[in-house]
Image: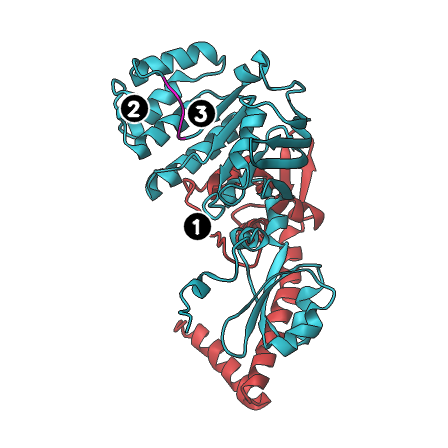
Amino acid sequence: MNVIECRQLSKVYVRKQALSDLSFSIREHTITGLIGRNGAGKTTLLKLIAGFYRPTSGEVSVFSERPFNSLKVSQNMIYVDDQMALPTTMNLQEILTMTGRFYPFFDRGLADRLLDYFSIHVRAHHQDLSKGLRSTFNMILGLAARCPLTILDEPTTGMDVAVRKDFYRALLKEYLAHPRTIIISSHLLQELDHMLEDVVLIDQGKLRLHLPIDELKQYAVGIVGHPEQLEPLLAGREVFHQDLVSTSRSLVIVRNDGYIHEAAVRHGLEIVPISAEDICVYMTKQTKGRIDDVFIRSE
Amino acid sequence: MSQTDLGGAAVLLDSDATRPIYVQIAQWLENEILAGNIQPHERIYSQYQLADMFNINPATAAKGLNLLSDEELVYKKRGLGMFVAAHAKEHILSKRKNQTLQQLIRDLVREASNLDVDESELMQMVSQAIQERKDGAV
């Protein structure tokens, strides 16, 4: 069963096309990573799914309903980011009580245990917490709400490495015990790729890939060799990136068609593994030249 | 089944390796069977146990289990889970001998030829390594 379906979904702000013609669906009880560069449209997409924004054209459906102004969607969905507008007059304890009234599956015991573990005082006020602790509290709300659809938009902003690790572990534990549909956006794929089932990669408002994570890792390979040696191998293949690594050797990132390993070995070329994160980076490259070029002084 | 509590500490997984995680899971399970930690007709770890132990998505763990099931090293009992097949250990041993070990030997021979190590010298190095292992030096 699909929890989310997008058909030719587009969103235009006053001067900017944020999303164009996105079509994909997300199955129930999967953890999907939404990956993209800064400004790719991740937050816009998530807010359309959450029903915070209305699409300019196309359609989004969540639990078979249009999420905008849908009580069913708001009750079964929680959206967590680092800008959650929580009441400033309430302390954290009161916020938890209020959240529990709204979300039918909210687990107060879990929220209290997590707050205790992270040493967050229940009488503190949300706006007084440090950036990292605020994100941690938001994450606790997101986990304890046990919503059938849990949307986490850059949830680890400001958290230190130890807290991030704990957070991903807690998320996986919760998911195993109480399966739900989770979308988590990040530009750091490396730190969460072990948890994911699928990855959605968007680039400049367009859907680039939607694949199981294992297939994404096999999607491209890196090959190192002399440019002249590489040339016959690259003919007819999709090349995502090419770069000189030394004066006589080039690195190319090329689409893995299943035969590329054998072909490279036959040509006596070296194959280097490329992480899923790097594949995403190479596939969504939009800078001009390389960063090093900026530092070449013009004569 | 011996329940080793790894507490989610991903002890084996090498996320940068070229081998996909689910292949590593399958190999870990094969090692458990080879070592006799899971006996024939004993229930093997579920996808959820593996997900918890190795801190991975349960769908990835399921793919690892499916590799074993495709090779008939485990069998399914409806509603009860997966169990180790009677001949699993022998199958894994012969598979590793015929595939993994053969490949390692081909790699060894190729590297020796790259380094101009001739046959007698290579054989001598192999015998020496065997002797060292017997003596407990390695």
Name the residue beneath numbered marker 2: A127
The chain drawn red is chain what? B
Amino acid carrying label 2: it is Gln
In space, the residues marked 2 and 1 are separated at their CA atoms by: 39 Å
Q: Residue at coordinates 46% horizontally, 65% vertically from top-left? A: A293
| Distance from the alpha carbon under mark 2 to that under mark 3 | 18 Å
Rendering quarter of residue A127? top left
Taken as a whole, is the magenta stretch helix, strand or loop?
loop
Q: Which residue is mark 1?
A: B11
Mark 3 surroundings: few (<14), some (14-19) or many (≥20) residues within 10 A:
many
Q: Please state the horizontal and vertical placement of residue A277, each as a whole percent of the image.
A: 52, 51
Residue A156 sits inside the magenta stretch: no
Query: Which numbered dot is residue A37?
Result: none
Query: According to the image, label 3 marks what residue?
Result: A142
Q: Which quadrant would residue A68 be assigned to in this image?
A: top right
Are the residues under badges 1 and 3 in a single subunit?
Answer: no
Cα separation, mark 1 vs mark 3, equals 29 Å
Q: Percent position (x, y) of residue A105?
A: 49, 15
Residue A150 location (% of width, % of height): 52, 26
Q: Chain of mark 2?
A: A
Q: Is residue A235 left or right of residue B3?
A: right
Report x, y in % for residue A48: 58, 26
- Tell me which amino acid carries mark 3: Gly
**Residue drawn at x 40%, y 37% as measured from the top left:** A156
Q: Nearer the viewer, mark 2 or mark 3?
A: 2
